[in-house]
Image (cartoon, helix red, strand yellow):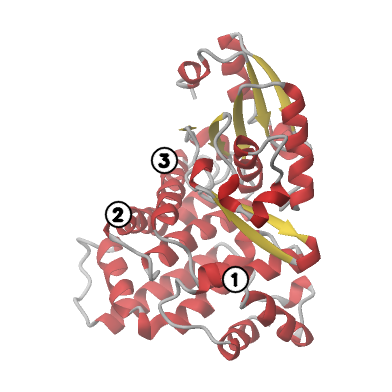
Amino acid sequence: MEHMGSILQGHKKVAVFTDKGIEASGVLDYPLEQVRKAGVDSVILDDLPAEPTYGQAQRVIDSFRESGADLIVAVGGGSVMDAAKLASITGDDLTVKGLLDDPLAGKKRVASLMIPTTAGTGAEATPNSIVAVPEKELKVGIVNPEMIADHVILDGRMIKKLPASIAAATGVDALCHAVECFTSNKANPFSDLFALEAARLIFENIELACLDQNAMEAKNNMLRAAFYAGVAITASGTTAVHALSYPLGGKYHIAHGVSNAILLLPVMRFNQDACLAEFARIYDAVWAGESRPEGPREEKAEVVLRRMEEILRKLRIPTSLTSFGVDSEDLDTLVEAGMQVTRLLVNNKKAVTPEDAKEIYGQVL
């Protein structure tokens, strides 16, 4: 955090994107102290709900425009950072709704600094911004390389007091990013490098980081992992887990990390036969040097999937949609909405048919 001063040099006014929960937690004090030390004026924009609609994001962006700030500092989780990224490329002539129609219309207008308070969405590293579209009961990803942050600060103090349930949901979201990007049709040597290291760090640190408030090394490792997984997204792309989770957030307002966590195992079990080589490589990266038998790919893949299952169990992640008011009568609607997310479904190693999607959703009801 102490490096923030050099980033602030030359700027006259900072717009701090955050939310009221982060303010109440006290972690906002760390970056605000650096702003005060630098003698830069600031305005706090905290009127952003979790999982915002494009209209709610636009209202905060309008306030930013009125502030006259020449630097954006986002202190928060994925929703806060996503809104800040949208603010960096929109203006009087281009709204968030306009970006839904033409994502590449936006151009970088204001520099941005991302300080994540979860580990996490990886939003600090990606060119993506997710907003809810109420009329479609769906979450939509806006993708534009101009949204990539100019600066990122990773500081374990920002996630020290994060409630275990939120730390778990966001941590498993990072795991989804790493595994999905590594098994994606768009995976490549660059994305593999970051996805594998992210997976290793998550498998080794996630439980301790989520359940022990004082485990600062594990927390810093999770912040690195979430960032690396975000880099992997920019070079590769997520797959059917994220595609099928979007309707759950858009219609039922299930938190992004939770919906991904619920779908992680069913989708990866579905993909297992098509991703044996990738799962075996994850095994080799995570358990390198350990005295484990060198078995066939099938055995390695099973170890990786069981480890994911163990993480979900230890962190008490929900594994069913019924507690969120979803029932069998909703299956057809979910399938129809999920199959519209072709941007991500095309990345899945194994083609997902509507019948497959219905089976996957059915497993978590």
Q: Are marks 2 and 3 in contact (CB under 8 Å)?
A: no
Q: Which residue in the structure is indicated by mark 2?
A: 190
Q: Quadrant of residue 80?
A: top right
Q: Are marks 1 and 2 in contact (CB under 8 Å)?
A: no
Residue 241 seen in render: no
The residue at 52%/55% (across/down) is 171
Q: Is residue 171 above or below residue 155?
A: below
- Given residues 79 and 317, the one toward you in this image is 79
Q: Position of residue 281 (x, y in %)?
A: 27, 69
Looking at numbered disc 1 in the image, what kind of residue is underneath it? Answer: Val
Cα separation, mark 3 vs mark 1, equals 37 Å
Tell me which label, 2 or 3, sits earlier in the chain: 2
Task: Kindly report the distance in space between the C-alpha atoms of the residues bearing marks 1 and 2.
Answer: 25 Å
Label 1 Cα crowd, 10 Å radius (few <14 / some 14-19 / many 20+): many
Q: What label does residue 141 carry, if any?
A: none
Residue 139 relative to residue 7: left or right:
right
Q: Residue, x 75% and y 62% (percent of image)?
A: 253
The residue indicated by pointer 1 is 341
Residue 24 point in image, percent of width and height? 74, 33
248 displayed left or right of 201: right
Q: Nearer the viewer, mark 2 or mark 3?
A: 2
Q: Secondary structure at mark 3?
A: helix
Residue type at mark 3? Answer: Glu
Residue 255 in view of the camera:
yes
Image depth: mark 3 or mark 1 in front: 1
Q: Is residue 257 left or right of residue 334?
A: left
Query: Residue sitting at 53 percent across and 65 percent down?
Result: 314
Residue 156 percent across, percent down from the top left: 49, 36
Helix, strand or loop at disc 2? Answer: helix
The residue where tag 3 is placed is 217
Residue 197 rendering spot, x and y as whole percentages:
33, 54
Disc 2/disc 3 C-alpha distance (Å): 26 Å
